Amino acid sequence: MIKVINNVLSLEDCFHLYSALISSNMWNLNRCSEGKNRGAFPGVTLIEKNEVIHNNQYWIGYLNCLFDRINQKLREQHNFLLDRRIFRIALNAQNDNHYTEFHVDTHKLNVFLEKTCGERDIKIIDDIISNVNLNVNKGITFIESDTQKYEADFFIDCTGFKRLLINKLGAKWISYKKYLKVNSAITFQTPDEENYNCWTLAKAMKFGWRFKIPVQGRHGNGYIFSDKYTTPEKAKLEIEKELGYKINIGKHIKFDPGRLDKVWIKNCVAIGLSANFVEPLEATSIGTSIQQSFLLMHNLNDPVGSVREQYNTQVKSIMENIRDFIYLHYLRWNQHNWFWKNYTYENAPLNIKKMIGLWKRRLPIDDDMKTSNYSLFWACNFIQVLNGLGFYDYNNSIKKQYNLIPTKTKNEIENYFKKINNILIYKKHKEIINERKNS
Ligand SMILES: Cc1cc2nc3c(=O)[nH]c(=O)nc-3n(C[C@H](O)[C@H](O)[C@H](O)COP(=O)(O)OP(=O)(O)OC[C@H]3O[C@@H](n4cnc5c(N)ncnc54)[C@H](O)[C@@H]3O)c2cc1C
């Protein structure tokens, strides 16, 4: 292990590996919703026969830490980061899509979705709903605009923060602001650059954090902050000072982190921003909507009261898992102003408070999560964030735990890194994407 870290890969090796992963026919674009995939996202799957590495949480945890350490060195020495897919190849990830990320151009996605709906005979009606009609027992009987009435036996509220339908049925908002302090975002665009990063930049700022996401032709950016500590104008100045040039603010969005007490009431389910929203960190909103949709799919058959109750409990659990995971990111970052001083182990949600002592002695395992199978974050995710926080003492408890890993698994890790040295051609991310676009 130590040998691998010290002889950290050369920059050229990394490009070779990355390029190989993109080009290799071992990779399949796959979409699946079964098995241990827990609902799952579309993702990249490695199919490599005769080499099954067991999904041992400890092993995944160590590999996570190792991966992050290597990345840290690469960043210091070469200003370069390894793609998460490299990590997935090491896990021999078969349909386990935890580490897959996509940066999607939202405008192009809308065009694509409209086209897909058309192909599947899904009718899109562009209208503004002004009234929701209720029946005491049944729930919603119809919704209407100024010109038209729409009847149905089941409704999905996806009206975003307006919560037009579910609010009428008496849903209540449970705020997480006691724990999570950011509640405002400004967004802006910055120009395309010579190369694309293979990651989302999430960088701590004075009163929150900022993101930078490459899409082809531009970068989408945002500063997520607490309006108790700064204003959009001051946030803009802070960014401009950092970037060294002026920016134009696209949107200023305000939100209250939290969730509905019940997302499914009578014949209406709220999905998306209408149901819950923690904050943009880790882009959990779309993931939650996907998981909620899968869950709904399994439960629509006979939606009696107990089914609704179970669904609501599961969604609550998904949201609390996100709240806890996001909270962890803020610990120990930069404690010299009042915004950051809010985040302490003492102020943390109960689940974190309960587990943190144990996690000092051993790495988190999935069983510690006590959450729905549809949740987004598991032991391996928590391990990574805790590692980033400098939480682990490598020379004591973690080393002891590493020593418990079977020799076979340790050898597999070593072999994986040896394999890296034998990989293909030198190319940059943007070059590869452009080539694939033109092929
Ligand atoms: C500050 C912020 C930053 C985010 N950053 C990211 C990010 O970087 N990456 C990411 O993946 N996700 C991000 N998200 C999450 C992303 O925005 C949501 O996941 C996504 O927009 C959810 O879509 P939605 O359909 O639930 O809500 P919305 O996108 O808000 O859509 C609601 C729709 O309902 C319509 N509507 C409302 N009222 C009516 C009415 N009366 N009649 C008819 N239609 C109506 C609206 O016109 C709108 O089209 C962010 C969210 C926020 C708040």
Image: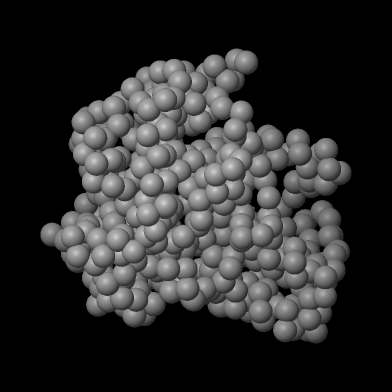
Image quadrant where residue 219 sits: top left
Residue lying at 66% horizontally and 70% vertically, measured from the top left:
166
Q: In this view, does 42 lie above or below 310?
A: above
Instruction: Give percent across and percent down for residue 339.
Output: 23, 62
Residue lying at 51% horizontally and 68% vertically, measured from the top left:
319
- Please state which of residues 318 and 145 is positioned toward the viewer in this rendering: 318
Instruction: Give percent across and percent down for residue 359.
Output: 31, 71
Q: Is residue 8 above or below residue 204?
A: above
Q: Is residue 171 visible?
A: no
- Please state which of residues 1 and 187 is positioned toward the viewer in this rendering: 1
Residue lying at 24% horizontally and 35% vertically, measured from the top left:
7
In the image: residue 116, left or right of residue 375:
right
Image quadrant where residue 401 sits: bottom left
In the image: residue 156, left or right of residue 70:
right
- Please state which of residues 96 and 108 is positioned toward the viewer in this rendering: 96
Instruction: Give percent across and percent down for residue 246.
Output: 28, 30
Most extreme residue toward the front is 407
**How are the residues colored?**
one colour
